[in-house]
């Protein structure tokens, strides 16, 4: 997929979905304005992971929304996902590229300026700046980089940047104004009573900030 | 790898290794007579898993001992392992074959006669009969199939069969006499104070039973 739109990037968490279906929440979120979806599963078995990925692909492909798989290149290849997202403890970029081929989007979580510069040099397609703000969703998150961290990374790398960690309707615009191409959220949409409304509000802030920044 | 020797198949468990290195234990076990090694990691990150796999490959390849990776085809491909071992909740065989190619050994855990027949039909290369006896190593294990279960599966499928679950020096020979091509162990070697001696004793029982069975 050429030039994906990272404006509003949803990362899933089935633990936050409660008794609602993940596909249902993702469908609502896409209707509200999500532009990219990452399926993140840290506890389930491979077959269950693949089943979830197939469900999301059936939903996202007709809408032209990229499906990114967290960590698992085998799952991404099995379902024909658009990309994989790798943390610093996941497979190295060069290995991932070698298995996944040139067309697969490879995203990297960067927890520092050095991580981001290295990811660009090693051939990543986009960078998740993580965390921008403090977050309760990811227990092992590094220290927040803040808006100043986003600005410094923006000056140092050309790749698309997605800010993640503690993003809300109230601060999403500032993250884009600091240089991010989009924001990624987990709980702000997945745990919302109305994922569609939450997505619309976040997307509105991102679009508004981009418009103002480009003026 | 053509016609691997499944006589004594070691499945790793770092949790049972204590403060000893897994590679050290595996090296001892191979010196004692292990003929096949499966790296099983259910908790660690992908990068750590790959590092472990590379360490074992460096040890096993010169000895001509196949390295099988549990569940993760991405890890198996990244390190050039000889095979993958799939549980009933892991990737389906057809998908795994499509990703892994024709040369990769694909093993399947069968918890019933039906599982075993299906695995053979779907193109598995060997079958792990699991569990033969009751075991404390695998918390989610199915009901034991017993020696009678091994016999029934032996009559129904042509693939190499490896019995796993509660295997000891005392019962390994009976499992082979019932029709298995080998036995797989975790704690009997990994948790042993002397993995080499434990492997030699088990291998001796397997070889003895095979010799007697063929008479």
Image (cartoon, coloured by chain):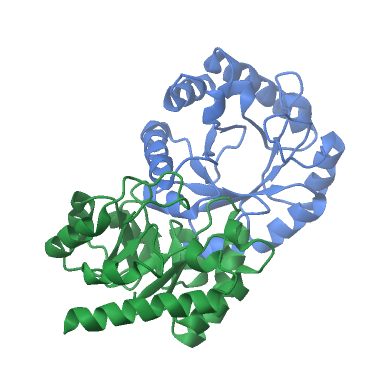
Chain colours: A green, B blue
Q: Is residue A136 above or below residue B8?
A: below
**Depth check, front residue: B74 or A36:** A36
Image location (x, y in percent) of residue A13: 54, 60
Q: Residue at x 34, y 66 (%)?
A: A171
Image location (x, y in percent) of residue A96: 34, 58
Q: Residue at x 35, y 77 (%)?
A: A205
Q: Is residue A185 above or below residue B5?
A: below
**Depth check, front residue: A13 or B61:** A13
**Depth check, front residue: A24 or B148:** A24
Image location (x, y in percent) of residue A146: 26, 55
Instruction: Please give left or right for residue A126 compared with residue B66 in the image.
Output: left
Q: Residue at x 79, y 27 (%)?
A: B174
Q: Residue at x 47, y 35 (%)?
A: B65
Dividing the picture into quarters, in which one does residue A70 lie?
bottom left
Q: Residue furthest bottom?
A: A62
Instruction: Please give left or right for residue B144 compared with residue B107 in the image.
Output: right
Whether residue B31 is visible to the viewer of this picture, yes or no, is yes
Whether residue A39 is visible to the viewer of this picture, yes or no, is no
**Depth check, front residue: B48 or A206:** A206
Number of numbered discs: 0
Instruction: Please give left or right for residue A211 compared with residue B39 in the image.
Output: left
Q: Residue furthest left?
A: A155
Q: Is residue B39 above or below residue A201?
A: above
Question: Where does the C terminus of chain B fall, quadrant-wise?
Answer: top right
């Amino acid at each position: 997929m050429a030039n994906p739109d990272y404006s509003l990037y949803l990362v899933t968490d089935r633990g936050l979905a409660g008794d609602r279906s993940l596909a249902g929440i993702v469908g609502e979120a896409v209707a509200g304005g999500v532009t990219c979806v990452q399926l993140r599963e840290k506890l389930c078995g491979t077959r269950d992971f693949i089943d979830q990925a197939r469900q999301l692909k059936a939903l996202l492909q007709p809408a032209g929304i990229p499906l990114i798989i967290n960590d698992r290149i085998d799952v991404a290849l099995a379902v024909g996902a658009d990309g994989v997202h790798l943390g610093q403890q996941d497979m190295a970029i060069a290995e991932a590229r070698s298995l996944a081929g040139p067309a697969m989007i490879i995203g990297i979580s960067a927890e520092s300026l050095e991580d981001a510069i290295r990811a660009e040099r090693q051939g990543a397609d986009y960078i998740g700046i993580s965390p921008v703000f403090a977050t309760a969703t990811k227990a092992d998150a590094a220290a927040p980089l803040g808006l100043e961290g986003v600005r410094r990374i923006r000056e140092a790398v050309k790749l698309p940047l997605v800010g993640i960690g503690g993003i809300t309707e109230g601060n999403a615009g500032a993250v884009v104004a600091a240089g991010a191409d989009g924001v990624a959220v987990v709980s702000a949409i997945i745990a919302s009573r109305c994922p569609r409304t939450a997505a619309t509000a976040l997307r509105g802030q991102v679009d508004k900030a981009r418009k103002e920044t480009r003026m």
